[in-house]
Image: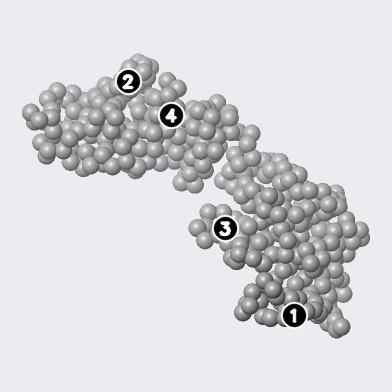
Amino acid sequence: MIRFSLFIGLCLLFSCHSNKTTDGTTGKGMQQLTEADIYDYLKPKEVAKNATESDKRESKKHFLQAMDLYRNKHKADSAIPYFKKALMLYPDAKTYYELGNALAEVKNYEEAVQAYSASTSFQYTPACNAYYNMACAQAQKGNTSEALMSLRDALDIGYANKKQMMEDPDLKNIRNMQEFNSMLVEHFKDMDVKTALFQSYARSFKNFGLPFIITKDSAGKYNFSQSISYDFFMFVPGMKDTRYSREVTKEYIAVGRLDTTQKYFTLAYAVVETVADTLNPVETRIATYDSAGKEIDDMQFSCYCSPQEIKEGTMDANRVITVNQYERKWKFNPLDKGYIDNEILSDKMVLTRKYSINSEGKFVEGDGTATAKTE
């Protein structure tokens, strides 16, 4: 549903003359817009910059005529030409915004999106309403991905009407989508929605059960097809900080659902440092959560930390976790010679740690000490 302020009525009379010269330009020599130019990226701003006071008055006259038709007489289709006449004389944010509202009312959603977008380029205030209405138009048109992006923009810059979001018929196409629920959790701290979202997150993991083992030879393997959606960022430590960064170097991979008790879920996920062409650092972590998706604890389970340092993990049926650390020796230093035609000479176990999961879902080191291993 379109968000707008109530228009009361026409209150000013304007002169009907314009300052066009005989060659069809304004007094400053700047061509006015044609209807085809209204959504051009550059021309409207040039026209606005060079518009005279007479142009602005004439434009406002058309704008008020449009508003009278649209708000007072409920004739959106009749108002649209007057909005466009106003824009051809003097493009501004408010006129674009109201044109978008009128276009959406007559179900011309594609052009409505153009009008709302233009209003934001002219710094419409409050911008969150423009992005919200854009989301509505995109959702009605069936462009669900774009609608979710616009809705997130609206929320990020201040849109706060949760009731409107939950009841607006224009958003019906996206309201049951995962990302919509994710936004509710993030911006409104909706715990009921968060619980449902966590259930969806947990179901996205393959059910591995116990025992669960990642050997030193498989510690560096991962499957990008199991990449975790950013809709679930609130359940993955560190993921929130990388969602919109331009320098993202980490990929998060769903590994498996290991264990479920009355008090907690245990999930395994991998973090891949995508900084190299081959042999990227990979660590697999296991995390415990309560039934509402609140993280209880998190620990490293296995790791291809570097070509020389590898950790393997095992979690047995009694929920005892063993992490073995290895020192790998190569024929040639991989940092100097690379991996092609290189050879692994040995894997020496240098450290073993044992952990268990207590009744509250916390990871507790088995004997509180580390044991050094030798060959």
Task: Write down the residue under mark 3.
Answer: 242
Say what amino acid the circle numbered 3 marks: Thr
Task: Write down the residue under mark 1.
Answer: 329
Looking at the image, can residue 136 be seen? no
Q: Residue at x 88, y 64 (%)?
A: 320
Q: Which quadrant would residue 364 be assigned to in this image? A: bottom right
Q: Residue at x 48, y 44 (%)?
A: 153
Q: Which label number is shown at residue 79?
A: 2
Q: Nearer the viewer, mark 4 or mark 3?
A: 4
Q: Residues within 10 Å of mark 2 (few under 14, many from 20)?
A: many
Q: Secondary structure at mark 4?
A: helix
Mark earlier in primary sequence (4, 2): 2
x, y percent for residue 141 = 50, 28
Q: Residue at x 63, y 57 (%)?
A: 251
Q: Extreme left residue here?
A: 22
Say what amino acid the circle numbered 4 marks: Glu
Q: Is 348 situated left or right of 168 in this image? A: right
Looking at the image, can residue 350 be seen? yes
Q: Secondary structure at mark 3?
A: helix
Q: Residues within 10 Å of mark 4 (few under 14, many from 20)?
A: some
Q: Front-most of 203 and 125?
A: 203
Mark earlier in primary sequence (2, 3): 2
Mark earlier in primary sequence (1, 2): 2
Q: Nearer the viewer, mark 4 or mark 2?
A: 4
Q: Are marks 3 and 1 in contact (CB under 8 Å)?
A: no
Q: Are marks 4 and 1 in contact (CB under 8 Å)?
A: no
Q: Which quadrant would residue 145 be assigned to in this image? A: top right
Question: For the residues marked 3 and 1, what is the alpha-carbon distance in whole angstroms?
Answer: 34 Å
Question: For the residues marked 4 and 1, what is the alpha-carbon distance in whole angstroms?
Answer: 61 Å
Task: Write down the residue under mark 4.
Answer: 110
